[in-house]
Amino acid sequence: MLSIRNLKVEIGDKKILNGIDLSVNAGEIHAIMGPNGSGKSTLANVITGKMEENISGTVEYQGYDLLELDPEERAREGIFLAFQHPTEIPGVNNIYLIKAAVNALRKHHGEPEVDAIDFLKLIRAKMKLLEINESFLYRSVNDGFSGGEKKRNEILQMLMLEPQLALLDETDSGLDIDALKVVSRGVNSLADDGRSIIIVTHFPRILEYIVPDRVHVLLNGKIVHSGDKDTAHDLEKYGYTWVTERINNPSEAVA
Amino acid sequence: MKESPLTGHLLGLHEELSGGLPGAQDATVAAIRQRAITRLTEIGLPKITDEAWRYTNIRAFDKVAFRPTAESNAALTKQDIAVLEIPSLVRYRIVVLDGWVSEAHSTLDELPEGVEFNRLKNVLEGSTDSETIQILEDRTARAGHGFEALNSAFAADGVVLRLQAGLKLDKPLEILHITQNDASSRLANINHRITLEKGAKLNLIERYVSMAETRHMTNASVRIDLAESAQLSHYRIQDESDAAMHIGYATARQDSGSCYQIFSISLGSLLDRHEVCQSLEGADAHCEMKGLYIGRGKQHIDNYTTVVHASPDASSDEFYKGILNDRSRAVFHGRIRVDPDAQHTDAQQQNRNLLLSTNAEADTKPQLEIYADDVKCSHGATVGYLETDAIFYLRSRGLSEAEARTILTEAFAAEILDQIELPPVREFLLELVRDKLVGNHNLKEAA
């Protein structure tokens, strides 16, 4: 699905990503964990095309050289980013955007525009799953939404667009435990053998609800450790310093 | 001082034509016209050295041989007018053709009891309505600009309308101004007077269209008088030829408890100057001034607004937005004056400009003069481009950059248009604005 080789982002002397290697197969859920400033959001920005300059290395996605595609082409080919800070867009109503986005994808795949009734039925079902009120659809995109509402709205869009590769950038931040459960339920409903999900976070809690196949620890722009889901528990227990120490002193690693 | 070529031309024209203007034989009317022409001779048409016209230069029209046309209904068929209709709008209609009220194309017999209608032409010829005559006189007497003097000097026709106390007109009234396709360099001086007696209510659509891209001039005055508790919603839609000059001024006086709402929509003409002068004379009166202007090509759009709070407990809410593409330029001047007696005034003003091109320009100038101490006044102005974060957000959902820009630009306009409470007018304008924005190459370019 996604293959990242020696990915670097350097702005001036500053190395923001310092040689990332990452492979994600279809059907897998990966978590990328790291403290603030470790380069997590930059990685998400490179994959979705928000960042287009100062990049070296390769990103291959379903046979495409991803870095050659425009952001909208990436979206139409099945990449979706749930933003850490979703943008407020006054005057554009939510259902209008979601429908336009669904149709942009359908058009790209040579399919006719979505039937209005089918669309409404489907979105209502997804909203029920995410415990979202109907009025949500007719408000301006993220305009005046609470933090939790914004995150739910991202997941609603994701469920409607059914991406092949979904990136969740700190979707858990600012959510209370009930909201986290609801959002996780939404994400899990998308997961299947054909799709990949990458969860970017610095708290392990979301990984109790969305269980990853692999967990990568990102520090100073580099993946310093990759492990199974238990890595998240270790991080919770010992913190990021533990990982650093383990790298520096492999012999003292926790057994 | 030497007058501009255009002023000179118009003074000469007046000498030639004044004998044939409506009411020319009436001594009162002739005297008013003479005073107006004296004033025009003294001050000339506005120049950029006049503070209120600093950003708006009319010199591009210096050499145009503007000329009023004679009254004629011949050229226009019912079908011609049908294509200009606002779809599915049920309304009363008065057509003004090249500056003359066309009774043949209007639905005057449908107007219900309680609506008094007259043509300014008839008023002038009969000198019957001293109040209306007085208005021409007032305008000449007060220190208005040269276009106002020009208007009084050439005053020929317009709608004189009065709604009797308590009458709530069941349908909107549309005054549709049409410049015909053979009317190149036509000059229309239009004077309307709308009076709402106590408790009356009216939806007024004042609309200007041209049938061809001719270089004509519209010089239009609307004088509004709202008695106690009267309510007027005024939709002013200017969509004239992209080569035209449009000068308009709406002057409204409000008694206590009255409510005036204006949507000033500027879409057409090469040079558009629109003034709204609002005088809140009664306590607890309320006015809302909403504006939307779209500039393309080399269009110049100047909104000059004044709100005078002369009584306590009144409120005004002003919100103008503009979208400027290509080399277009907008000027917004928002003056709010709060008199010493106008305690508890609530006056809000906002002007927001969206530039779609780096060659477009907006100048915005609030001017607050507050002489009372217990008031709530606020103002804000912005000039900016589309937000890159919002564009990226839409692109990340699969929309092209051009689509993203179109959606965001339309949303910017919709914030004003969505407030229009007549659905056919709202839909019509949303569509019209969309048309103006389509084919805008710069929508696709990075701003």
Image: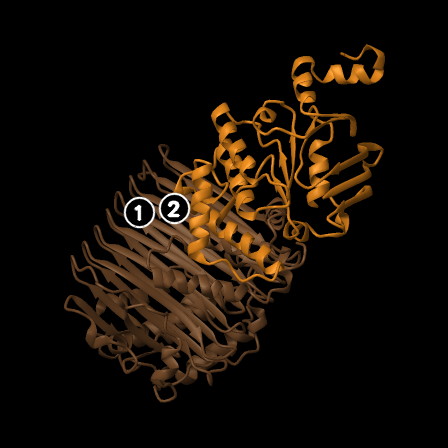
User: Do callouts 2 and 1 mark residues in contact (Cβ within 8 Å)?
Assistant: yes
Circle 1 crowding by C-alpha within 10 Å: few under 14, some 14–19, many from 20: many
- Identify the residue at the far front of this view: A193
Chain identifier of the residue bearing label 1 in the image: B
**Which secondary structure lies at badge 2?**
strand
Q: Which residue is drawn at the image coordinates 50% and 24% (left, top)?
A: A176
Q: Mark 1 belongs to which amino acid? A: His
Q: Which residue is drawn at the image coordinates 44% and 67% (left, top)?
A: B238
- Of all chains in the rendering, the one displayed in orange is A
In the rendered structure, the colour chosen for chain B is brown
The disc at residue B317 is 2
- Identify the residue at the far top of this view: A252
Q: Mark 2 belongs to which amino acid? A: Asp
Q: Which residue is drawn at the image coordinates 59% and 60% (left, top)?
A: A107
Q: Position of residue B45 (x, y in %)?
A: 49, 68
Could you tell whether B161 is left or right of A194 in the image?
left
| Screen quadrant of the C terminus of chain A | top right
Whole-angstrom CA distance, mark 2 to mark 1, is: 8 Å
Closer-to-camera residue (B115/A116) = A116
Residue A14, placed above or below residue B108: above
Q: Which residue is drawn at the image coordinates 35% and 89% (left, top)?
A: B74
Q: Which residue is mark 1?
A: B286
